[in-house]
Image (cartoon, grey):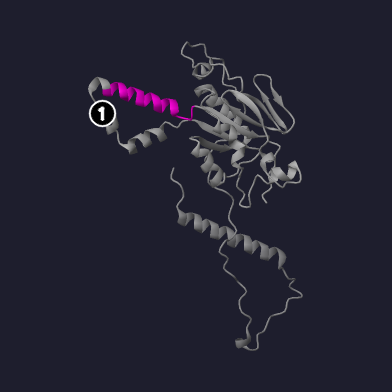
Amino acid sequence: MHSPSPQLLRVLRTSLVNTRCTSNLTRFCQIPLATATPCVVSNPSTEMPSTRRNYSSPIRPARMIPRAHAHKPASRDRGPESKEDTQTNFDSLNVLGNIPAPSTAIDACLDSGFHLNNGVKLTNGDGLLLVGGEAFAWRPWKAIEGAESDLVAKDAMLNSKGQFELDESVWGLLNLVWPKPGMLVLLSFFFWYRICALVYGYNMFELDRKIALRFANSFTTDMLILGLGGSTFPLSPETKRHINSLGIRVDILDTRNAAAQFNLLATERGVTEIAAAMIPIGWKARPL
C-alpha cells in the first residue's frame, strides 16, 4: 500500500477546512426569516473590502499517518532464562576486575571533603592532593593574598574571565617530584641507544636534536587530573603553562568525574603516573 501523495493530502486538508468553516457559520450566524432584511448597497464604490484572509498555517486535520514507533510493551518479561553454554558473562569483560584498587582511590565525594579507600576521611572542607600514592590536604585558596575570609578567597580562585587561576606556589609539591614525568623512559631510551651504538658502531651524537626533543615530549605521559568542585571551569593560560612546564599534562573535570577518572587511570597505570588535585563538590564558584 502506497502512502498518499502530497496533492491528495492538500485536497483533503482544504476540504476539511472549508467544511469546518461552513458549519461554524451555519451554527453561529443563523438569522430568523421574520427579522431578516435585505441589504441594499447604494453606491458600489463604497463597498466594504473583503475580510477574508489567507493564513499561512491553516487548521491541520487529525493525524492520518500511523506512528513510526511501536507502543510501549505491556510486559518486559523475556521468558525463561537461557541455559545454553554460550552465554556471555559480562563480569569476565572487566579486565580490571582482578586488580586491587589503589589505597588512595576515592570512595566518596562529599560537600566538605572526601573518603579514601584506605579509610582516610577529609571532612573539614579541605581539598585533596594525590601524588605518588600519597594523600595530602590541599588548601589552594590560602595562597591568595588580601582575602578577608576563606569564602572570599575561594571565590577569588576564579579570575575576572571566569577562569580557574592559582599562584605557582600552590603547585610546589609537583616541583619536588623526581624523576620528572617521562624522565625514566627517556633515560632508558638513550641507554638502549648507547648499547646499540657500541654494538653496531652507531654514533650517538648523530641523533638530531629535534628528534630528541620529539621523543622527550612524546614520553611525557604523566597527568594531573584537576577536579574543580561541582562544575567545570576553563583553566587560565598562565596556570596551564606552569603545569605543562613541569612536564605534566592536565585534565580538567568536575570533582565527581575527576574522582572516577583518577580511580580508573590509577588502577590501570599506577599511582606514580597519575596525580590528582581536587576541590570538594560543595564549592560553588562565583566569578569576580
From the viewer's perspective, tell me whether residue 134 is left or right of residue 178. right
Please provide percent x and percent y for residue 284.
70, 42
Q: Find out whether residue 182 is within the magenta segment.
A: yes
Please provide percent x and percent y for residue 205.
29, 32
From the viewer's perspective, tell me whether residue 197 is left or right of residue 97. left
How many numbered markers are drawn? Answer: 1
Asked where in the image residue 257 lies, by quadrant, the reply is top right
Q: Amino acid at mark 1?
A: Asn
233 to 280, vertically: above or below: below
User: What is the magenta range?
Assistant: 179-197
Please provide percent x and percent y for residue 195.
30, 21
x 58%, y 56%: residue = 60
From the viewer's perspective, tell me whether residue 116 is left or right of residue 212. right
Q: Find out whether residue 195 is within the magenta segment.
A: yes
Depth check: 271 or 40 in front?
271
173 to 5, vertically: above or below: above
